[in-house]
Image (tube, rainbow, N blue to C red):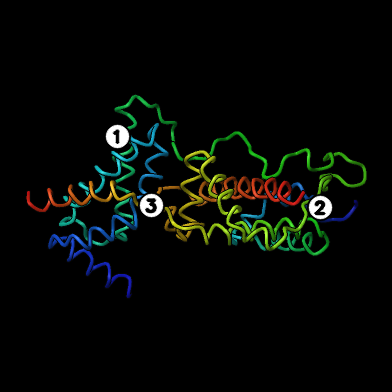
């Protein structure tokens, strides 16, 4: 309720041409918009252009926005449409669903960390077990840099999902609506992304500990 | 190895962690998951590491807008307003 009321206020301010209201909105969403656009277009500049075009479309559509979805969902739907159009124009062939996780399976943990699935006594058990992470190393600034690095190394779709869910704190429903993803696909992308980030952290902390 | 309900291996468990944390497992799958965790120290550590990863991500600073990008967008806004 409170959210709907403040959204209504924000919309009134935007329609009235209130620059401060627009600045707040842009600060809130621009980085995420660019990240999501990056799932469709091939480079950062194109993604920024798509985001800029989205803002204009949002402003021009304000009077038509009826509040049937949240403002955020509406903005991201506009972005998605513009990004798809741009991708086609740039001659990028998008797969049937650009956002579906690739069907090539990705293991959360390298297979060589486990014993053979046919092992007579311990099939599929850990061969190289994970070790508890030292609390103080986790809180160090350098660990934070490694995390950011690991996120940056992810494929664009996984990066967008994990950023919105775990850094920006969106719910799974909000991410599904904004990116038009099925529940399963959202979860698979999140799983792959989180598993890789955990693995990167493990590698780093092992090195740091020796 | 002749139990009626096939037990999860560690390798299978690590693929279910997100489904577990998202509450997406069926009741039966959840029980199998928790049964394994209850008996396996290494998987307990693994699950804890996934939780720690998520917590750390939640404390990362949100990416912020560069002043240049903000200026450009505000200019576009003024253009829209005066149109």
Percent position (x, y) of residue B65? 34, 51
Separation of residues labelled 1 and 2 (CA atoms) = 49 Å
Give the chain of mark 2: B
Instruction: Report which quarter residue A153 is drawn in.
Output: top right
Furthest-bottom residue in view? Answer: A2
Residue A3, given in percent of the width and then of the height, sits at 33, 71
Is the residue at mark 3 from the same chain as the one at mark 2?
no
Residue under pointer 2: B6
* Dots 1, 2 in contact, CB < 8 A: no
Q: Which residue is mark 3?
A: A178
Picture quarter with the N terminus of chain A = bottom left
Task: Decide if residue B25 is in sight here.
Answer: no
> Could you say where residue A204 lies in the image, as x and y percent from the top left?
67, 47
Across and down, in percent, residue A120 comes to 92, 42
Q: Which residue is mark 1?
A: A85
In this view, which residue lies farthest toward the right? A121
Front-lying residue, A154 or B23? A154
Above or below A153: residue A26: below
Nearest-to-viewer mark from 1 and 2? 1
Q: Rounded to the nearest whole Å, what is the CA distance between mark 1 and mark 3?
A: 17 Å
Residues tagged 1 and 3 counted as in contact (Cβ below 8 A): no
Chain of the residue that carries numbered disc 3 in the rendered image: A
Q: Tell me the SS state at disc 3.
A: helix
């Amino acid at each position: 309720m409170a959210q709907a009321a403040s959204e209504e206020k924000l919309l009134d301010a935007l329609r009235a041409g209130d620059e401060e209201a627009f600045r707040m909105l842009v600060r809130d969403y621009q980085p995420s918009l660019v990240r999501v656009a990056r799932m469709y277009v091939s480079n950062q500049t194109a993604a920024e252009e798509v985001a800029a075009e989205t803002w204009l479309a949002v402003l021009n559509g304000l009077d038509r926005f009826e509040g049937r979805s949240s403002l955020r969902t509406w903005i991201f739907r506009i972005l998605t449409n513009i990004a798809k159009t741009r991708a086609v124009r740039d001659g990028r062939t998008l797969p049937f669903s650009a956002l579906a996780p690739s069907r090539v399976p990705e293991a959360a943990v390298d297979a060589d960390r486990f014993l053979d699935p046919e092992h007579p006594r311990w099939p599929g058990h850990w061969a190289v077990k994970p070790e508890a992470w030292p609390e103080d190393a986790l809180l160090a600034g350098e660990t934070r840099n490694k995390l950011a690095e690991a996120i940056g190394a992810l494929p664009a779709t996984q990066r967008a999902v994990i950023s919105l869910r775990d850094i920006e704190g969106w719910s799974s429903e909000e991410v599904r609506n904004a990116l038009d993803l099925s529940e399963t696909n959202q979860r698979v992308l999140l799983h792959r992304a989180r598993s890789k980030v955990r693995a990167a952290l493990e590698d780093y902390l092992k090195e740091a500990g020796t | 190895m002749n139990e009626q309900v096939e037990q999860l291996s560690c390798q299978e468990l690590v693929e279910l962690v997100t489904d577990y944390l998202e509450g997406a497992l069926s009741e039966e799958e959840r029980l199998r998951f928790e049964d394994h965790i209850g008996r396996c120290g290494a998987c307990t550590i693994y699950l804890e590491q996934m939780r720690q990863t998520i917590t750390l991500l939640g404390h990362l600073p949100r990416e912020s807008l560069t002043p240049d990008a903000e200026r450009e967008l505000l200019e576009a806004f003024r253009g829209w307003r005066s149109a």
